[in-house]
């Protein structure tokens, strides 16, 4: 599945193993990638947009005073 992204060997594929999503530079977005990268592939672990949204939601819940102006 990873080979279908046509990633050059010099670039690194960003992959979120938590949500099984890969960043596709050509599309400019995260896409579902249910098969984990094969060992030795050019993939690196990264936090996807879903991870970032969950972290922001957690911070807003734990520290409401810091986010009161942006809520």
Image (cartoon, grey):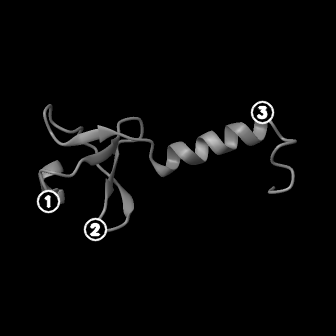
Give coordinates of residue 47: x percent, y percent: 45, 42
Give SS at disc 2.
loop
* Mark 3 burial class by Cα count in 10 Å: few <14, some 14-19, many 20+: few
Query: Is 12 or 52 nearer to us in this picture?
Result: 12
Q: Tell me: residue 24, above or below residue 38.
A: below
Q: Are marks 2 and 3 in contact (CB under 8 Å)?
A: no
**Which mark, residue 26?**
2
Q: Secondary structure at mark 3?
A: helix
Please give the name of the residue rendered at 15% of the width and 39% of the height, measured from the top-left corner: 41
- Residue lying at 86% horizontally and 55% vertically, measured from the top left: 69
Where disc 1 sits, the SS reads: loop
Front residue of 11/64: it is 11
In the picture provided, is 39 more to the left or to the right than 25?
left
Q: Which residue matches tag 1?
A: 6
Q: Which quadrant of the rendered structure holds the C terminus?
A: bottom right
The answer to whether marks 1 and 2 mark residues whose Cβ atoms lie closer than 8 Å is yes
Quarter assignment of residue 7: bottom left
The residue that disc 3 covers is 62
Residue 17 at least partly seen: yes
Neighbor class of circle 2 (other Cα within 10 Å; few <14, some 14-19, many 20+) is: few
The answer to whether any part of residue 1 appears in the image is no
């Amino acid at each position: 599945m990873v080979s279908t992204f046509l990633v050059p060997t010099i670039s690194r594929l960003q992959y979120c193993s938590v949500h099984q999503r890969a960043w596709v530079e050509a599309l400019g977005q995260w896409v579902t990638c249910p098969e984990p990268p094969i060992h030795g592939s050019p993939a690196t672990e990264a936090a996807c947009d879903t991870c970032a949204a969950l972290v922001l939601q957690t911070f807003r819940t734990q520290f409401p005073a810091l986010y009161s102006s942006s809520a």
